[in-house]
Amino acid sequence: MSFDPVNRRTFLKLMGVSGSGLFLTLQGCGNASLEEGRETVMSYIDPEDFVIPGEEVWYATTCHQCPAACGLHARVREGRVRKLEGNPASPINHGRLCAMGQAGLQLHYHPDRIPQPLARIDNRLQPVSWDQAKTRLHKILAKAAENPQRFALLSGEVGGHLEKLMDALVQTIGGPSRYVYEPLSQKIWHSATQSALGITSPRLQLAQAQMVLSFGADFLGPWQSAVHFAAEYGRFRTEPRGSLIQVEPRMSLTGANADWWLPIRPQTEAWLALGLAHLLASENKAIALPDAISQALAQYDIDSVSKITDLPTDSIRRLASALRTRTPSLILAGGPADGQVDGSQMVLASWLLNYLLGNLDKTITHAGDSPFAELETRIGSTAALQKLSEHMPALDTLFIYQSNPVYSAPDFLQLAAGLEKVRNTVVFASTLDETAELADLVIPLRSSLEEWGSRVPAYSPDQGLLQLQQPVMQALYPQHVASGDLLLQLLTQLDKAYQQWPDFYAYVRTDLMKYREQARPDKQPNPWKLPAVMTPPTYKPVMLEQAFSTDQLDEAFWEHTVAAGLLQLPTQQRSLRMQPQVPTIKPVTADQNFPFTLIPFPQLGLYDGRHANLSWLQEMPDQITTIVWDSWAEIHPETAARLKVKTGDIVEIRSTHGSIKVKIFEFNGIHPEAVAIPMGQGHSRGRYAAGVGVNPVKILAPVFERDTGELALYATRVQINPTREQDSLVKLAGSDSQHKRRLVRTINIKAPDFSHPEGSAS
Amino acid sequence: MDAHASVRVRIVSDSSASRVTAYLNVGRFSTDLRLLILVLCFTSWSPQQVLAEAPAQPIEFPHDVHTNAEDNAGNAINCLYCHSYARRSSVAGIPTLAKCMGCHRYVATDKERIQQLTRYWEQGKPIPWKKVHDLPDFVYFTHERHVQHFVFQQGQSVQQVCGYCHGDVKTMTVAEKRRPLTMGWCLKCHQQFQDNPVDVPRPVADWHINATDQSLKAVMPADTAHAEPLRKAPSDCWECHK
């Protein structure tokens, strides 16, 4: 960049002129925009009594930024939502909210939101009116109904009443095809847990544990329910302080908080888990294991486990000893541990360890049978996308609701090419993303702060929980039809029975009324109350039916539920039973051409890439490296030295299915045989996302988990090829070294050397 | 502002016996003339002076018809009836359309202005009123504190209290800016209270308006939800510049 030379004299002249100009503007013209009538002040038309201009009103609703479904309180002033906070009444997040939740506000006001429907005309997406779009949509639907086998609906995890309507739509059309796709799917964990415990989602009580051993489960990061586990973790770390041990090839946020972090060789976590099980089982005869299991465990002796996992035998013994002494404990598995070919086996091994340590019903409890069985969120999977891509050539019509598979799917699925062959692709999206760009019809969605909805969280500390979502302000684009209303309109076209609900609000409200009896004040811990004016002085729950009409009771129940933002019903808890299973894992064969394992890790921020277009989250530094607005490849300094590359050098990461170019970041918290690249960047659409970084998921190889068919996200082997290019990384932290300033002084406890100039911290 | 534009300045003064209206076309090179006129304008400010030409409102709302005394062809409606948020919020607010229609469903329905109002109501559209009074974003001003203090604790007339800052609105049709609302002007009251016990503001003698309403203190119970102990008007910077 070059500047015109400005000398001191010119500068002072300019300042003098502009200064007097500013003075004149401020003094002379007064409040010009006011006097010229350019400032308006709008009155309300007919507001609620509690709405006062200048005073805030808080509405309870539900967060949609990730599948955790935290409770929200939205601060609204002058009809505009201005801030989001956690709902203190929600047992998921207890009034807390993560950065992604906070950024929900930016998504709501995003300048990239599509203002009107788009249709492909002359092979180009062009704006059309809502009437035209609806006519086209109804025509597409009518054709789909004629040939249901050639119709499919793909969505992310939706849950609640919207999920119910989506299922109804697919069933009414008569097609078999409803695909639920989630790039960061927990399907392997849920499926293996179901097989071990008979339930998909037990309650994980960190706070009750003396020790947590986590195989790659980044529970302080994006694993399952970040805010909930962060609060649990807080209690776990209060007196008596529990210890956290994290075993993973790349240090996650949870790993950075651990007391002991063990860098395990990638793809070998299951070996360590079974090696520990072998040690514990052979020493603890109190819990009898079936012979078949004992025999199977025998091959995981400490020496071979140490060799395979690249962990010293001493460490493994210390680990086993810690597990024996600190009970009850909690063993978790997730992330790079279960995203493997033997992922299910890894999860099963973690449950076997919990079983051997007697943690069941102590730190792992039954969460109760859900009273909202029909509203439960269907767990998304990556296998669904694989099936869809196989089904695609036979499809005429594909509806894609709030999902961006063209971005988040690996290249080997060739999804974009497949989509182009589908005659009618209808994408329901709020911004024009990579998938919407290929659509034939784009239906813009309202934001989650503008419409009704409900959600049964996939991980919930209490199964009797339904999170309710309500519009907290009028739609920014009032002509946009709410998702639920649109689905009801489409259903009504096919089945007149759906005419009974004038809109989605009526549908949700009518459906929830059936829980009023279960939610009676005398039956639940968080009772709903009648409004003060309706409460008789001698109020007793049994009098409800006698004292009030059904309508009055319905209204009171509904008002309470909406104000609380959730509905909690009592559940029956049972004790857990587990049938240990014989572990069968196969060693991963090393490939000399591809010596590294790729770890495409998600962050609490951009998540799976869905938030890359939110500049707040782009600007938020990565929790470990503090890098912003970029992608990077973490490799161990030893590996970097061997490859003769250093931080900032651009390398090519190549798998059998593609390559990406990315900057190196030397990082001590990674195993030398691993290379880790954050997920979420590498978009081609979005004003804040396009052109930033790379998407590591694109080069994943078609490796699948053996039992579930899920994509093994962390099992792709890659090679690192240095290029001669170089660039800098923008990061908040300055340097990892103390530069001999002795800011933090450390000593080696085994061989203290007090004369050391800097210590070993740098 | 575009320096090439021709700026029209209108000065209206009631302080002299004859009403003087001057239209000045100020050209490209006459910024010093503008400065002179405007400095004169501010230094010679008087309470009855209109400081800015009132912007054209979507409906020419007659404040006089609503608030003037009944014997003066008005309806003697209390300011706080329509601007009901002033006692509860930092902003006084514009009355809701529902409130207007509460009366005007039946009252004066043959008038063009009311038919205009009804059209807004039927279409469900808010009226885009033009702002007359505004403070910069770096100033925190609260109507609630002032109204609670003077009206509900001291028992002054609402017209008088609103009139401190807004002038004698019952004599206007559409609202006009009669007070400069500058920092120095605010301090005329606020500084006085640093030395003296809390009382009516000193400039009230100058700004006195012939209030026709009664004190609300006698007819309305104390607003305990918003009541605060009487205290001196603050003059710390942070009280207004948060």
Image (cartoon, helix red, strand yellow):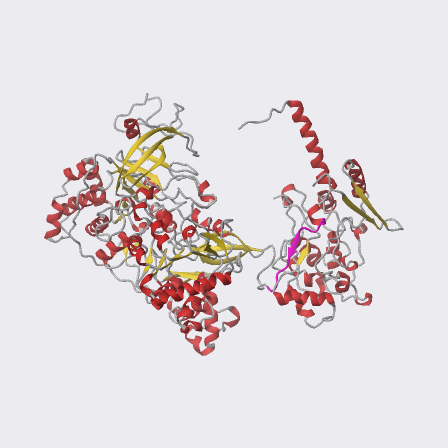
The residue sitting at the bottom extreme is: A546
Camera sees residue A661:
yes
Most foreground residue, A5 or B228: A5
Q: Main secondary structure of the magenta part?
A: loop
Total labels drawn: 0
Whether residue A486 is situated above or below residue A603 in the rendered picture: below
Where residue A586 sits, quadrant-wise, is top left
Residue A159 lies in the magenta stretch: no
Residue B199: x percent and y percent? 74, 51
Task: Report x, y in % for residue A498.
Answer: 42, 71
Judged left or right of residue A526, residue B166 is right
Left or right: residue B212 versus residue A573 is: right
- Could you tell me which quadrant the C terminus of chain B lies in? top right
Quarter in which the N terminus of chain B is drawn: top right
**In this view, B106 is above or below A274:** below
Q: Which residues are magenta?
A: A35-46
Q: Is residue A568 visible?
A: no
